[in-house]
Image: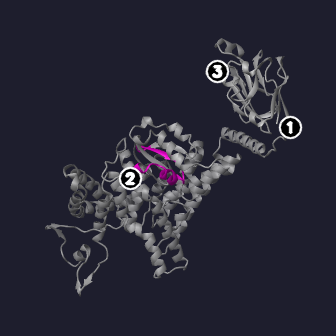
Amino acid sequence: MPAVNYDTLAGDILAKVGGEQNVANVVHCATRLRFALKDRAKADKDAIMALPGVITVVESGGQFQVVIGNNVPKVYAGLPGTLTADREGEDAPAASGGVMARVIDVVSAIFAPILGALAATGILKGLLLIAVAAGWLATTSSTYQILYAAADALFMFLPMYLAVTAARKFGSNPYTALTLAGALLYTQLATVNMVIDGQVTATTLRAWGQAGNDVTFFGIPVLLQSYTSSVIPILLGVWAMSYVEKFFNRIIHESVRNFITPLLALVIMVPLTLMTLGPAGVYLGTGMAWLIQQAYTFSPILMGILIGGLWQVLVIFGIHWGIVPIFINNLATQGFDPVKTAAFPAVLAQAGAALGVFLRLRARKDRALVGSTVIAGIFGITEPAIYGVNLPRKRPLIIGCIAGAIGGAITGAFGVLVFGTGAPGLLTLPIGIDPDGDPMNLVWLLVGTGLAFILATVGTYFFGFSEDDLARDAAAAAEQEAEIAEAEAPEAAPGTDIELASPMAGTIVPLEQVDDKVFSSGAMGSGFGIRPTDGTVVAPVDAKVVVSMGHAIGLKTTDGLEILIHVGIDTVKLNGAPFSHAVAKGTQVKAGDVLVIADLAAIAAAGLDPTTVVIITNSGNYATIAPLAEGTVTSATPALLVTR
């Protein structure tokens, strides 16, 4: 398979979604480009799916999603900067569809850009937990503290990251949004005393409030909350600020707009967020966590079954974005999350189902493709396995969902928790290590996840293929083995003669007399024509069928001779109606084997010329191509001599 040029692929995708002018917004997640299109009718879905490097196309949540796989950043980088750069102050496009579609669109656009960093920090936290549990590092060592800072910084300052992505989605100035987030965090950072000439000149607002003083803003009470690691307060703040900015941008003259609008936005939004939106967001987040915890308490097994069985289905439709913030919110408000645990069996079960497909397949090329998706799936990237392997075959996807539900039931039954973030996969399993030292939490996470993986693998191997699936695989294996054998076969030595028989009974005519300029001009190669008296077309030489279209048969010999037999002129217009018993592509045939039977009367009745053309399409590779017959011939008469 040729290497994919991702810059070219980016341009091809952009052209086929209707061009830059048809793209309202585009972001990418771990495996796919997510387009918000102005006019869906301008996008050619089938053409995009046919592009090398594209796994599939999914339309969900108001988005046109092009699934690329792990190389999606390379494609995204190839898109024009006008589409991918942050656009300050612009009106962000809204997703089409209902309320749920709009919610999913907003959540995915805000969280997708930071998922890679979230996964990386989650893995690092897991590795640190392992290092501490194994006695390799002490939590009091400076080495641990430095690495923990790297692992925890994103989570601690999460509002600032979300401020940037939310600003882009809501059409706000990202730097003003960052300042708003900084102001929220500034209220609870550790006290900073700046001593100048023996005088303490600065402390934080949080420290001042904790000193026993009431915190007010022009006499209005300010209820200070903890905003580190929070999600909802900054999203509410940036959303509201986007309207404030748009209002002032309309009424303030452009000569002073660039600094007056941010000034007024901050003066209004920082106090407003601290007094109302911030506390409301904190309470809302706490309430969501409480509801999830109550549902989990009611039936942890049922919740595990639902998340474990349906998580990957939600991923297919993009609906999982509505649940991701709940995971993060639970960690922020409680320090642990009981829901995400079931996502681990769900993810690894789909990887296991793909492994079952890999073990059962016989076709080499298909096995190589499936094998790569298994590896990606084990590390948490399941889209290639789902879209490229499990979903097209249906049974593996269903078996993977059932196995995931069983694994989720186990994690729910034993109250498994996770204590960090990151995409569920092999490297993030350590986020199940209990900081309080309970080893069984991780053990049951491993049991549920491992069992789901094994059940999906075994179940798919034995029950994931229908008889038709196995027959198609056997045919593909035979074809691929023939291709490999052909590629490894030595080419004919110079001077070697290859003799072709006439494929039909009839009258030989010179190629230049055929009533089709493409053939008669020799543009497609040298050969001859036949005015047939019998519609049976046979192989003129031992070869493999590489094209089988009824009216046209392509053959290739083991030493590389390529032959096209085109039955009739313009007979493609008949859509295969006069042709029967066509041999399948990939079939090895012997000279004299029937390739196809043409109804000559039907061709004539349609007003078309039944003259059949035999062309050596790679004529340039041969020294001479000479006729051996003229006039009337049978289907066994030697008709052409090809010399290398």
Instruction: Using the image, tell me which numbered label, if any, was put on residue 570.
Output: 3
Please tell me whether mark 3 sits on a helix, a strand or a loop.
loop
Q: Amino acid at mark 1?
A: Gly
Q: Earlier in the sequence, mark 3 or mark 1?
A: 1
Q: Which residue is mark 2?
A: 107
In the image, what residue occupies the spot 29% across and 60% down?
176
Q: CA distance from mark 2 to mark 3?
A: 54 Å
Dot 3 alpha-carbon crowd within 10 angstroms: few under 14, some 14 to 19, many 20 or more? some
Dot 2 alpha-carbon crowd within 10 angstroms: few under 14, some 14 to 19, many 20 or more? many
Region of the chain picked out in magenta, as a range: 60-82
Q: Count of labels shown?
A: 3
Q: Earlier in the sequence, mark 1 or mark 2?
A: 2
Is there a contact, CB below 8 Å, between mark 2 and mark 3?
no
Q: Which residue is mark 1?
A: 495
Can the viewer see residue 13 in this picture?
yes
Single out the mark in the foreground, 2 or 3: 3
In the image, what residue occupies the spot 73% across and 18% down?
513
Q: Quadrant of residue 419?
A: bottom left
Single out the mark in the foreground, 1 or 2: 1
Q: Position of residue 527 (x, y in %)?
A: 76, 26
Query: Is residue 71 part of the magenta span, yes or no?
Result: yes
Identify which residue, 67 or 381, lies in the foreground: 67
Q: Amino acid at mark 2?
A: Val
The extreme left residue here reads 219
Compared to residue 350, the image places residue 127 above or below, namely below
Q: Position of residue 84 (x, y in %)?
A: 42, 51
Instruction: Using the image, tell me which numbered label, if any, was put on residue 302.
Output: none
Q: CA distance from mark 1 to mark 2?
A: 68 Å
In the image, what residue occupies the spot 24% across and 54% down?
245
